[in-house]
Structure formats: C-alpha cells, structure tokens
Amino acid sequence: MILGPRVLRPSDRGAVTISLAILFPTVLFIVLMVVQASLWWYASQAAVAAAREGVEAGRVRGATLADGDARVGEFLGRFDNLARPVRVSHDGSDADSVEYVVEVRTQSVLPFVDGRTIVRTARAPRERFTAPGGTP
C-alpha cells in the first residue's frame, strides 16, 4: 500500500517547534543540575583530601602545623576555581593529635546559584616513638 504525502492541517503547523521550545530549557536545566551536583561532589572530595594531606604533613615527628598549612595550600592551589579555599584551620590540634578543618567554595554553573561552601575535617594522632615495653 502506497500512501501519499501527509497533509498537515493548518492548526498543526509549528507544533513541534513549540514543543521543543518548551522542552529544551527543561532538559538543559536538568543537565546543568547534574553538572552542578558533580562540581559539589568534586569540591567535597578535594576538601577532604586537602584536610588529610595537612594532617599527614603535620603529624610526622618533628613537623609543625605550618608544614601542614603549606601542604594544604599547595594541594588546594591545584584546583583553581573548582574548589576555592575559604578557610583552613588547625585549631583542634593539640600535643597528641592533629586536626585540620578545610572550608572551600565550589564553582557554580547555574545562574542565580552561588557557589556552595563545603567544610571537611580530618584528624589523626601525632607520631611518637615509644621504648620497648610501651612507655613513651
């Protein structure tokens, strides 16, 4: 069976264009939300890795907290605007342990949405040598 060309009624003209004009911004917004969520996750991972780097540098025997600060600054410097450092703190550190709190701001790809601030913490005991038998 051979069918002739489909004849559009005047009321159907432009229906696809209007449908796409309504649907496309919605699809684009969903894609940008996925990208934004990925950027938040990435910045979160960068912040926790920076905190761990600072703790590892600061907990070594003979190291100072300035060594940890330098390592955190160097590590976060690699991320540019993806995870901008807002605050790095080691106020929870004491003689027995090192704690770093890293606060970063994420990049935003959505209009009218500012970058989200993410705070991550890492803590570990300081290295110390003990004599045989367990006495420090």
Image: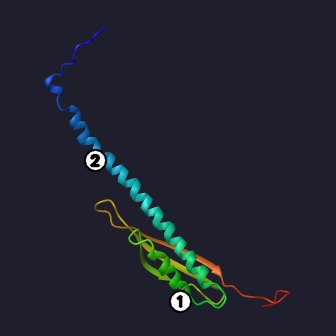
Would residue 25 be found to the left or right of residue 136 on screen? left
Q: Nearer the viewer, mark 1 or mark 2?
A: 1
Would residue 42 be found to the left or right of residue 65 on screen? left
Name the image quarter holding residue 136.
Answer: bottom right
> Could you tell me how far apart the alpha carbons at marks 1 and 2 are, in whole angstroms?
49 Å
Q: Position of residue 97 (x, y in %)?
A: 64, 84
The residue under label 2 is 25
Name the image quarter holding residue 63.
Answer: bottom right
Q: Position of residue 19 (x, y in %)?
A: 25, 37
Whichever of callouts 1 and 2 sits on the residue coming sooner in the sequence is 2
Residue 6 is tagged as none
Instruction: Check the image and report above or below for 98 versus 36.
Output: below
State which quarter of the image contains the N terminus.
top left
Q: Position of residue 56 (x, y in %)?
A: 61, 79
Residue at 56% in and 88% down: 65
Residue at 28% in and 47% down: 25
The kind of residue on which mark 2 rests is Pro
Q: Secondary structure at mark 1?
A: helix
The residue under label 1 is 66
